[in-house]
Image (tube, rainbow, N blue to C red):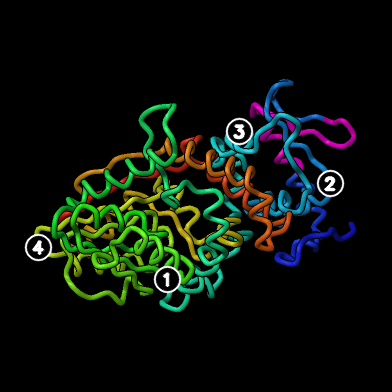
Amino acid sequence: MTAITVGPRFPALAHIPKAPVRAAAARAILRTSVSQLPVRVTFPDGTVWGAGGSGSPELRVVRPQALFARLGTDTKIGLGEAYMAGEWTTGPGSDLGDLLTPFASRLTRLVPEWLQRFRRFVDENLPEQQRNTTAGSRNNIEAHYDLSNHLFENFLDPTMSYSAASFERSDESLETAQERKMERILDAARVGEDSRVLEIGTGWGALAIRAARRGAQVTTITLSHEQAQLARQRIEEAELSDRIEVRIQDYREVDGSYDAIVSVEMIEAVGEEYWPTYFRTLDARLAPGGRVAIQAILMPHQRMLATRRSFGWIQKYVFPGGLIPSVEAIEQVTGQQTRLRLVTQHSLQPDYARTLRLWRERFTTNWDTIRTDGFDETFRRMWEFYLAYSEAGFASGYLDVRQLTFTR
């Protein structure tokens, strides 16, 4: 097989692994798997696999040998890498999110059970450099959030909220749904006049601004210099600089006492090794009578246990050091390590699928503007796959996202 042309951001993709036995196995597994899915897999020679009819989502294979070589070498990473490299794409009229959703719905059953027993022999462990130590966390956060504020501005809504929205009607805007999400989490934490608020994970300042408009005094922390810079600008434009302090600081370094602690989709970047430290910090920083409200992406507990040590496509290309917890894991840690107890939870699962679809539509529409920051076609396909892959996780029910409230 000859090398392919990819952009300079991902030079390793130009190398196609040589694994003929594993490639043959991957081919057989995919053919068996799609025979039970409402999709079509089409090949350059006209061969068609899958249980889907002519109107079903189409996975169009462009370079079969390269695709199966990648799948055989690492199933969890190979599919995304093959998409980035242009070795497969969607057929005319097919949407990538719709195509990936049936796969996500049967993710735990795509590989035969007898083969799953050999997972430990083929799974790649999380790289040491992605551990969420104080230094490692900074590197991991910067790798994603310091890509470019311009990138995020061109696919997020005007609030710059990079998390699940909360929709109530089919015709409402993403901005309205994001505002509702923020109000809901501030209500859960009982943020009001003169509340001392700690926000872990600033984003671009939207939640801190809304808390300050309620009369709260807010300390918000981030490890992203790009985020901090734009958040401070937005806070100044909102004339709230006297009520909000933006710090570039690790959660483990925060001191003081706070009536409310809020954190939106940041726990996924903590890592299992540091969950006890994270929740002990929340407990230590929470004033008597205070409340903690976090929004967390979640997965079923048994699935989390099965995959927590393995290295996947998302961790390699999008969120280094990331790990999605389960509600059970969170309750175990808080029950054993802290005085915090989970008192309410509210799911936004279907809302996240819709949020991600809208982000992907905006990303595609604004690609010509985004690419001026130096992002190439390989990056475009990576980001497109990331958004569609995530959407499929929520649309299929494989992933959940909830607002969790804790008190002592």
Q: Residue at x 50, y 63 (%)?
A: 145
Q: Position of residue 400 (x, y in %)?
A: 41, 42
Boundaries of the magenta span? 27-47
Label 1 sits on residue: 223
Q: CA distance from mark 4 to mark 2?
A: 61 Å
Of circles 1 and 4, which is in front? 1
Mark 4 touches mark 2? (CB < 8 Å):
no
Mark 1 touches mark 2? (CB < 8 Å):
no
Amino acid type assigned to the residue bearing label 3 in the image: Asp
Q: Position of residue 328 (x, y in %)?
A: 32, 50
Q: CA distance from mark 3 to mark 2?
A: 22 Å
Q: Earlier in the sequence, mark 4 or mark 2?
A: 2
Q: Earlier in the sequence, mark 1 or mark 4?
A: 1
Amino acid type assigned to the residue bearing label 4 in the image: Pro
Amino acid type assigned to the residue bearing label 1 in the image: Leu
Q: Earlier in the sequence, mark 3 or mark 4?
A: 3
Q: Earlier in the sequence, mark 3 or mark 1?
A: 3
| Numbered circle sitting on residue 63 | 2
Name the element at disc 1.
Answer: loop
Residue sitting nearer the eye, 361 or 397: 361
Q: CA distance from mark 3 to mark 4?
A: 47 Å
User: In this image, 338 relative to 299: left or right?
Assistant: left
The question of residue 159 being in magenta is answered with no
| Numbered circle sitting on residue 288 | 4
Extreme-left residue of the structure:
288
